[in-house]
Image (cartoon, rainbow, N blue to C red):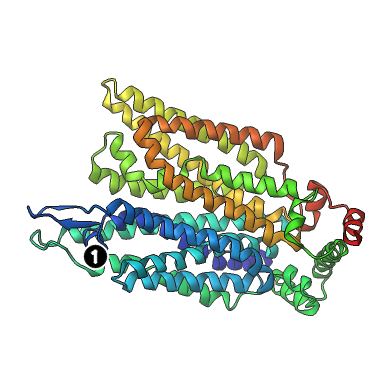
Amino acid sequence: MGNFFNYIIAFASAIGGLLFGYEIGLIDQVLGMQNFAITFGIKHYNEAGLLVDTEQAKDIKGNVTFTFLLGCTVGAVIVSIMADILGRKRSILVGGFAFAVGGLLQALTGSIELFYFGRVVSGLGIGVLSMCVPLYISETAPTAVRGRMITVQQLMITIGILLAALVNLAIRNSQEQVNATEKQGSEPEWRIAWGMQVVPGVILVFLMFFMPYSPRWLEDRNRHAEAVNALSKIRSADENSAAIQAEYKEIKEGVEFERSIGNATWSELLKPGIINRVLIGVTLQFFQQWTGINVILYYASDLFTAMGFPYETASKSLNIVNSFVNVVGTLPGMYLIERIGRRKLLIFGGLGMSLSHYLVCLFIGLSKTGNASLNLGALIFVYVFILCFSSTWGPVVWVYQSEIFPLRIRAKGTGIATFSNWSMNAVIAKVTPIIIDAISFKFYLIFGSTCLVMSLFCVSFVPETMGKSLEEMDELFGKVNVHEVESQKKN
């Protein structure tokens, strides 16, 4: 029963991942909706009556993406402080509320300025949730299944992407039935697509009201009785049971040790025993974006079309299959993370993704010599790449960063790592179209090589955390020297 309630906590809080996934899957398709493009100045009818891009079309599309990522990046920084002050639970409530408000603004407005503002607000919510959800789950989950429970967030992200793809398909099919003489089509459709974001946001806020606070955060705030009570509820066991008292004692001793070191400051992230964790967390999040996953997810329809598949097939059926494979691929990762560990998944996942990228490039190159059927090979290995990512680097990076930092700086450390993720996300979104224009399908070689470097990094610098309690991470990564800290205080 203890694990059952823990899974309820994980799935309730991981609705934040569903919001993120829905956003990823939605944006590309909505930007192509006729009425949306006309409403916000992306397209207009020329003198010949043809629907064409406006001069500012590229800027507007870029701004739609940039404003969201700007909000995400700022949200990741804000939550580094907010998660300690308000707590993990309340921070998730704030993130869910912000996302719902932003989604409502985007669905109802006809002003491009207000739409941009809604994008920033939604991004703030996602930035908060992307860091705080795995952090909250890590602090409430039992050690033996902590990794599996945190991967629930990745599962919900993939479900959100699939949901958005299905919603987009339904909307596009509906638009195709609109009378061809109606230039703008049915206006409510794109508003419905944006407005549907509000529903899971409201559900997240509602459910989180009934979820417990993190026992570790409560103990850090000297709310001892509440910490024991929250722990007993989470584990579905009596407060006075030996198991609850033993776990609480470990948590309490961990908090007391950290207090003996002193109050957490940003400068502590640079101290021996901590800076190595910061560098690992930041580097893993950096590499996660350079796997090429967001290129595949953001531009799937265009990439499949470039392989030689008809646009209708690429943007509908192949895109749906891509999203479905992403969901299915998460499941083996959820099982293996507590069987073979985080490190092996990262190493073998990187190798699998590297090989997939190289083979996609090879098959596309060979198909251009006259055998178009080889494009099917390229398509298959795109799906293999998705499987490798969703079962390894997709969930494991979030698991790893949420469990390696000491409690006193856990929010700051995970916030910095999450900032690395979102800032690289923005860079990828900006440079990918430029790279593809310059070297065409050979861009797969760049990501293939990056994935190979990622595996080598994990072999050399990433220790295994499976089976370790959060309080045991200091033994794995090295403790801060208490005497050194006290000496620095006196000076």
Residue ID for mark 1: 39
User: Looking at numbered disc 1 in the image, what kind of residue is underneath it?
Assistant: Thr
Residue 15 seen anywhere in this rendered image of the structure: no
Image height of 463 relative to 449, above or below: below
Q: At x 71% / y 69%, what residue is drawn?
A: 235
Q: Residue at x 62, y 44 (%)?
A: 283
Question: Is 375 left or right of 232, judged from the image as shown?
Answer: left
In which image quadrant can residue 267 be found?
Answer: bottom right
Residue 452 lies in quadrant:
top right
Please tell me which residue lies in front, 332 or 376: 376
Instruction: Indicate the position of residue 490 as horizontal and vertical percent values.
Output: 91, 61
- Nearest the eye: 62 or 1: 62
Residue 150 at x, y percent in the picture: 61, 57
> At 51% across and 67% down in the image, what residue appears?
125
Q: Nearer the viewer, residue 208 or 296?
A: 296
Left or right: where 441 falls relative to 205: left
Residue 111 lies, in percent from the top left, at 30, 70
